[in-house]
Amino acid sequence: MATEHSDPLTLEVVGLIGTVVARYYEEYDHAAAEHSLTGAQARVLALLSIRPMPMRRIAQKLKCEPSNVTGIVDRLETRGLVERRPDPSDRRVKLAAPTEKGRQTARQLRDGLNFAREPLADLSVEERTVLRDLLRRMLGDDAEE
């Protein structure tokens, strides 16, 4: 007897999610390469374009080690895409923040990602809302930030 986690529908959904993720990363890496960035650098830049944050928070969001984030931010800073500045609420903490050039690059990266945008355009607002809500539910509290 199949369990809840190995029934054919669940396995198909897991496979489809895997395919979506793989295609997203492939397109993201391609778009990043057009700006001479790695996929990881582009993801950090995109995250910072939402709001500046400390390296530890970036690492939490990207599920990686803070030392990796420090190296990525160093390289983005060298390119003039990111700067470090004191956190106004705690001057001991440094925030990574996009420069104007970094915000422009992040915007160009976002505009260059058509993979999800085109199929999503075929869904109604209601369908996109349901999809968003289901994905948020699957991901838990982290998805809304």
Image: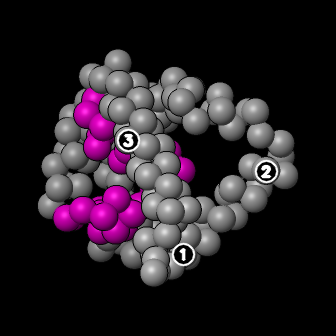
| Magenta region | 37-66
The reply, left or right, for residue 143 in relation to residue 128 is left
Q: Amino acid at mark 1?
A: Gly
Q: Nearer the viewer, mark 3 or mark 1?
A: 3
Q: Nearer the viewer, mark 1 or mark 2?
A: 2
The x, y position of residue 34, in whole percent, is 35, 18
How far is the residue under mark 2 from the one under mark 3?
A: 22 Å
Q: Which residue is mark 3?
A: 22
Residue 58's place in the image compared with 98, above or below, is below
Residue 45's quadrant in the figure? top left
Residue 127, label in figure: 2
Q: Amino acid at mark 3?
A: Ala
The x, y position of residue 31, in whole percent, is 40, 25
Residue 95's place in the image compared with 50, above or below, is below
Q: Nearer the viewer, residue 46 or 33?
A: 33
Q: Amino acid at mark 2?
A: Glu
The x, y position of residue 137, in whole percent, is 61, 72
Local crowd size for mark 2, using a 10 Å CA cut-off: few (<14), some (14–19), many (≥20): few
